[in-house]
Image: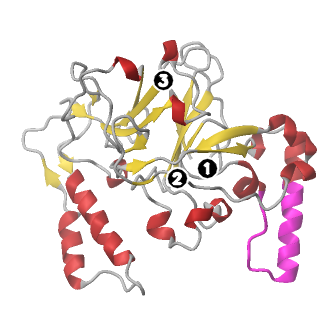
Amino acid sequence: MKRTTPARPLDVEELFPELAAHRGTTTRLHPRPGRPGLSESSVGGPMLWPADEPWPVCTEVHGRGRGRRPADIRRKREVMAVAEARDPYRGLTEEERRLVEELEREHLVPGASENDPLPMIGLAQLYARDLPDLPAGPDGADLLQVFWCPFDAHRPTGYSMLLHLRWRRAAEVVDVLASPPQPEVVGYEGYVPDPCALHPEQVVTYPFAGLLPEDLCARIYAWEEALEEEAEEREDEADPVAYQYDLSIPPGWRAGGYASWHATDPYPMDCLTCATPMRLLLTVDTSEWDGGSGSWTPVEDQGSRPRPASVPTGVVVGNHGELNVFACPGDPAHPPRWSVQ
């Protein structure tokens, strides 16, 4: 089903004409529950992976023998969805509560050691034909496949995530791996995506305010402060329009465009191989919209309950944030970098 971003509350370039020089585009992926096929872009769907190619694994030393079963995580989501669909919502029944408690139990994997090859989870596969803002892959590759380890246990902090990106030419895959390996348990339920089809939409975007020229950034902040003061004088409970939340960077899963730095100060994302400034490749978001970014809610989703409509993938990044993955424009084959916001 098509997803349509509403027009912005106002024309930001009329207020700040200099922004025209910084105007860009990003492709909102709009993942929604579905049954995507091998030849489709998806989140949590089947991967077009060659049968004779080793599946990505995590080999870093960390605990991997205790956690929750992916099947239990998905079953819990089904139970919660049924409860949330009731009108009016009255929470879980006693029977559902007992079932959820059982499904949330951790399990041990007998004999698991801290350096056993751990199958990574297929997070997304993105065909270039579907996403006009997906940066080009190396050597004519037209398919990007994204994997991650289901444990927060990696360097440099010992609590970091680990990603693996694979570019390939889709036409070269003839024999597809029928039964990809899966981890027996995961350390965090937010690493387990639900299968979602994508409904790409290209929209206009502008840089994070803190990365704009200093004078322009200061004028935007002053304008926002004036709107907030006016709202307080009117005792208006509705939040005024804001550059960050309404006019610049849309929420949700996206390809290309600009990264948001709302949780940390912006810091350089230069390629560790060649020092070239990297560009945003992909944003993985916990929610498609929230209370602060509700103006981006697609027309087709307006009037629906925030849950589960705004959290279709089941993915949770950090403390309900977003993951920005960067790629080297000089050589897309260079290792990616990422930031959690």
Rounded to the nearest angstrom, the CA distance separating label 3 from label 2 is 28 Å
Q: Residue at position x 35%, y 50% from top? A: 195
Residue 68 seen anywhere in this rendered image of the structure: no
Residue for badge 1: 263
Residue for badge 3: 142
Q: Earlier in the sequence, mark 1 or mark 2?
A: 1
Q: Position of residue 23 (x, y in %)?
A: 79, 39
Quarter of the view holding residue 102: bottom left
Q: Label 1's element?
A: loop
Task: Provide the residue span drawn in magenta.
Answer: 221-242
Q: Label 3's element?
A: loop
Rounded to the nearest angstrom, the CA distance separating label 3 from label 1 is 32 Å
Quarter of the view holding residue 25: top right
Q: Main secondary structure of the magenta part?
A: helix
Q: Are marks 1 and 2 in contact (CB under 8 Å)?
A: yes
Q: Amino acid at mark 2?
A: Gly
Q: Amino acid at mark 3?
A: Asp
Q: Residue at position x 50%, y 73% from top? A: 305
Q: Label 2's element?
A: loop
Label ID, residue 321:
2
Q: Residues within 10 Å of mark 2 (few under 14, many from 20)?
A: some
Determine if the magenta segment contains residue 230: yes
Q: Residue furthest left?
A: 110
87 and 339: which is toward the camera: 87
Q: Position of residue 158 (x, y in %)?
A: 38, 38
